[in-house]
Image: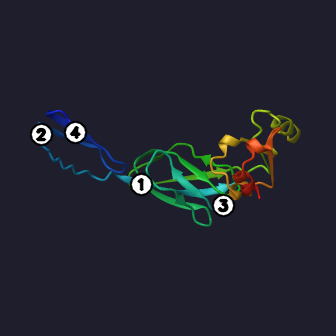
Amino acid sequence: MTLPEGEYTLSVSAFGFVAGSVSDVTVAAGEETQVNVSMERAASGTVKGNLTGTGTAIQGKLVVLDTPLAAVDTDANGAFSISLPAGNYSIAADAYGFEPGTSAEFTVNADAETEITLDLAGLPPVLVVDDDAGKAYEGFYSAALGDKAHKVMGYDQLTSLSGEYLAQYEVVVWFTGDDHRSTFSAADQAALT
């Protein structure tokens, strides 16, 4: 980094390490100052648990929120084990055929195991896609279906539209409004096909 000349204290932090600082760093005009920082690994523990869908073990993917960690796959029985620095966390879970969900916040203590279970709700049988350019036709269909039988999703919420995503539902109703050519793109049609 480029800094005006003077005396500095540098604070350093990284996920999984104890934060530290280096003081009395002198920056002189026109010169390069090298500072080496050694950090200690933070004490860690393990979160173990099971992913279930409406009470039955399911296979899925987990993400520890607000961390740089990559997503973790459960085993075929929904079991998982993740080593984490001591602290407070939440986990987001996703599995085919189920609504994504997030765990309650839990605490990982150093050299200890924390057990949690994430239970995801099943998807309703009908997905209603609201892609009618603001015409609100989906409201009539939703009223007819009732509260639990369907899920209404705005087209702008379908960030990763794919055939695999749509295939999770028994029925997909796609409202395109009065002029389907302006809302129902070729890519949308291919995903539905």
Marks 1 and 4, Cα distance to the nearest angstrom?
38 Å
Mark-to-mark CA distance, 3 and 2: 63 Å
**Disc number lying in front (3 or 2):** 2
Q: Which residue is mark 3?
A: 57
Name, please, the residue furthest toward the front: 181
Instruction: Of the two numbered discs 1 and 4 on the same chain, state the one appearing first in sequence.
Output: 4
Residue 138 or residue 56, whichever sits in front: 138
At mark 2, the secondary structure is loop
> How much space separates mark 4 and mark 3, taking CA atoms?
53 Å
Who's the residue at 71% across and 58% down the image?
163
Q: Residues within 10 Å of mark 2 (few under 14, many from 20)?
A: few
For disc 2, the marked residue is: 30
Identify the mark nearer the N-term, 2 or 1. 2
User: Of the numbered discs in the image, which one, if any, rests on residue 2?
Assistant: 4
Number of residue marks: 4
Q: The C terminus appears in which quarter of the rendering?
A: bottom right
Task: Count neighbours of disc 1 (C-alpha within 10 A) and say few if under 14, some if 14 to 19, many if 20 or more.
Answer: many
Disc marking residue 45: 1
Q: Amino acid at mark 3?
A: Ala
N-term-proximal mark, 1 vs 3: 1
